[in-house]
Amino acid sequence: MNHSINKSEKIPPLRLLAWEVTRRCNLACLHCRAAAGSGPYPDELSTAEGKKLLDDLASLGQIVVILTGGEPLLRDDIFDLAAYGTALGHRMVMAVNGTLLTPAIAARLKDAGIQRVSISIDGATALSHDRLRAVPGAYAGALTGIAACGEAGLPFQINTTVTRANRSELPAIFDLALKLGAAAHHVFVLVPTGRGELIREELVTPEEYEETLNWLLARQQGGKLFIKPTCAPQYYRLWRQDATARGEPITAATHGMEAMTKGCLGGQGFAFVSYKGEVQPCGYLELVAGNIRQTPFPEIWAQAELFRQLRRVDDYHGKCRVCQYRKVCGGCRARAYALTGDVLGDDPICPYEPVG
């Protein structure tokens, strides 16, 4: 760990942390960043190690902690971990595939302090969803899980990963999220890592990407459901361009954006901890900044050279270096690395050419 930090370097506050509590999963999704399967995966963080991580996070404030996987419900102590984080003041949420949720389990999650679960819907029909999830019945299981949340009074959001195959189904998935009573729709754009490398041809083209982001911006402006594009930092460039064209002030409230006014948050306000304690900028960017088994998380967050590089947006390469939106967008660092091998390089599906 590099301890020589220039005093002018600003350490951004940590806002969100995703902890891969397990890599075990009952599905085998074609786009899975972890290429997760049934396992076993040795060297998983113990209950005590997980609680120490949550303790260390508390020194940085009250963090949104995303318990993710794999499938988090396959971890026996998940309710205990959720309750422990809640007692520390963290906003505990969970990312599940829905197939293991029952009303009783949803109620236990709510009692443990889980404030929201995310459940993925990647197709408007069972055929398209199950094709990407690679397990028959996954769509029906997700809907059953959503119904269980409703019965338990546990808020849920819909997550969707956009590919060329399902892009045309986004309007129907959005309508389904509204009909089901989702609190939000988080739309991910494919990063070809993990098993996603094997479907690299499903990555949207720059033109399709821009069209999709404009469609999402229009839905956000419609105000029916909160939209959060993920792995899609160029959305924030479009948001600013749109606000400028309308003569509106550049504020988070302009389009109901809450506080999400920054594009790529990897190392900027977000971090990821793997099932074996490795700290990464995000789950899709498999470069390791440190390991919490050797170094406390707050020290890694403040001092890791990888994070410091990502925070120096003026040192990015290619057109990202000169783009006037580099501080609000930043390009997807994970996609740049996956497709070019340069973590500071261009985001290959960005169609924007910087002025000048």
Image: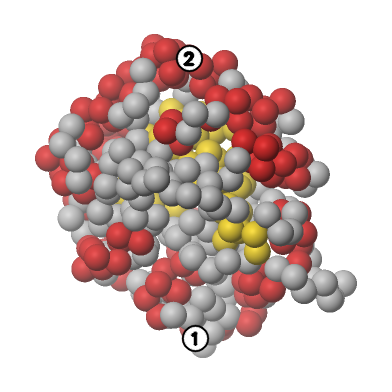
Mark 1 burial class by Cα count in 10 Å: few <14, some 14-19, many 20+: few
- Residue 253 seen in render: no
Percent across and percent down for residue 86 are: 67, 27
Q: What residue type is labelled 1?
A: Gly
Give the residue displayed 31% in from the left and 38% down from the top: 26
Q: Mark 1 points at which residue?
A: 318
Mark 2 burial class by Cα count in 10 Å: few <14, some 14-19, many 20+: some
Q: Is 209 positioned to the left or the right of 66 in the image?
A: left
Percent across and percent down for residue 56 are: 75, 45
For the N terminus, give its image quadrant. bottom right
Percent across and percent down for residue 71 are: 40, 38
In this rendering, the answer to whether 111 lies above or below 270 is above
- In this view, the residue farthest toward the right is 7
Q: Which amino acid does label 2 sit on?
A: Ala
Element type at mark 1: helix
Q: In which quarter of the image is residue 103?
A: top left
Callout in the foreground (2, 1): 2
Q: Is 118 positioned to the left or the right of 136 in the image?
A: right
Say whether disc 2 or disc 1 marks the residue closer to the N-terminus: 2
Q: Mark 2 points at which residue?
A: 107
Give the residue displayed 34% in from the left and 30% down from the top: 98
In this rendering, the answer to whether 106 lies above or below 47 is above
